[in-house]
Image: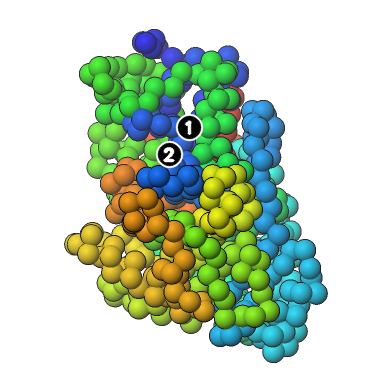
Amino acid sequence: MFRSRYDAVIVGGGHNGLVAAAYLARAGRRVLVLERLDHVGGLAVSARAFPGVDARLSRYSYLVSLLPSKIVSDLGLRLELRRRRYASYTPAGDTGLLVDHGDEARTAASFARVTGGEADLAAWRRFYALTGHVAGRVAPTLLHPLMDRRAMRDLVGEEAWRELFERPIGEVVDERFADDTVRGVVLTDALIGTFADPGDDGLLANRCLLYHVIGDGTGDWNVPVGGMGAVSGGLADAARSAGAEILTGAEALAVDPSSGEVTFRDAGGEHAVRGARVLANVPPAVLTRLLGGDGFAPEGSQLKINMVLSRLPRLRDAEVDPVAAFSGTFHINEGREQLARAYAEASAGRIPALPPAEVYCHSLTDPSILGADLRAAGAQTMTLFGLHMPARLFREDPAGAREAALRATLASVDSVLAEPIGDCLLRAPDGSPCLEVKTPVDLEDEAGLPGGHIFHRDLSWPYGEPGKWGVETAFERVLLCGAGARRGGGVSGIPGHNAAMAVLS
């Protein structure tokens, strides 16, 4: 049962919609959340992807950085985020670059082995001191009304503004670092889910990098204990306990911006409710269609492969334990030149011959996502995120292109290991390997993301019209509260918080 009128109707029960619902309900507002799927959480969910295998995978979203601790505290979330001891490991021939948060001397020795000197390590420290400075200044502003461009420039200072906001990040990285491997490690944060040339004057890669280094003032990428579903589950509990109503299996069909009427369909047929405000936790292209227009479809650019391993693969590098290498971000063929070559191939309409990718083994940080028997047997989860895989590559022949991308990506993985990754895959009870693949077209079909764009559209700068919250649309009653809002993208809850604040203010 539901009322005919609410203070706020939220279209979409992803994590941002749940944040908005919780804040508004806690403020005494009557809130209804409509979710098309049979569960809340959007892409921030945990799932047992392989029948008979007791492993809860973070199937789509996989790490948490941008979620402000203030939101966790405000909503009373029982959420544990574990910092990864190892930031990253990057194979380089028979050695590799290990960045160890807990041992600066070990990191320095690794840089020396890979680069042959100390210059790039010094440049690394200077660069990340700069991004750390920006994180400390910018992150606190994300939960307040927007500041304008000049105010943001004054806030971060001239050097940071020039290097991160004005010059193409590719030029900055090429100037600051000499080693191709080191350059690539820095640039991957500028290309996650973003099909861009880091040397382009449009600065799309700069915007992507910025959001990857400012999270909660530290830029740390943490593992949510219990998987990503723990984030969404906690938010749903907070919203419901505050009085918000959540309907799953309820697909929004239309939004009337003048009256706030939302038409939706569930198992019982079509219904209409009215909201004094309508908060859209859907991509802007979807909102445009709900409002009766033609939505422009953005283009996502990633390949996601989820796996369960019977054991960790062996490395070529005898100096590094696989547990250390796979506990952080394991970079695969992501050198500066390799990234440029893959971008050129994908731009020409071809699946890259040696796809750049990175993997994470969440179970090394959070063993609770594995059942007791799997833990005892030494099994591990592994999730792979592939770069430069734009949706255009999968349009004509989705199944064939998916298989081709999988083959090329697994070959890329094998090229940096001492043994094939296929030899380490766990087999489900039916004998099938524990491996699943998601392309941008799959995300479009399964999750309703136009173009499979994980950020809903290209990321925006974290500044704008002063006094606005970055969630406003052309219609007073309708607000964006999803990743497509200004200061959206990633698992952050920031657009949900800001939409709620826009309503309450």
Q: Is residue 53 left or right of residue 128?
A: left
Front-most of residues 444 and 298: 444
Secondary structure type for disc 1? helix
On the image, the x and y values in percent for residue 411 come to 39, 75
Q: Is residue 422 left or right of residue 465?
A: left
Specify which label sits upstream in the sequence, 2 or 1.
1
Query: Dot 2 corresponds to which residue?
Result: 42
Residue type at mark 2 is Gly
Query: From what the image shows, is residue 74 above or below residue 362?
Result: above
In what quadrant of the picture does the C terminus appear? top right
Quadrant hosting residue 474: top left
Q: How does the figure colour the protein chain or chains?
A: rainbow
Residue 8: mark in rendering: none
Front-most of residues 153 and 30: 30
**Residue 205 appears in the rendering:** no
Residue name at image x 44 percent, y 22 percent: 246
Q: CA distance from mark 2 to mark 1?
A: 9 Å
Residue type at mark 1 is Gly
Residue name at image x 68 percent, y 63 percent: 86
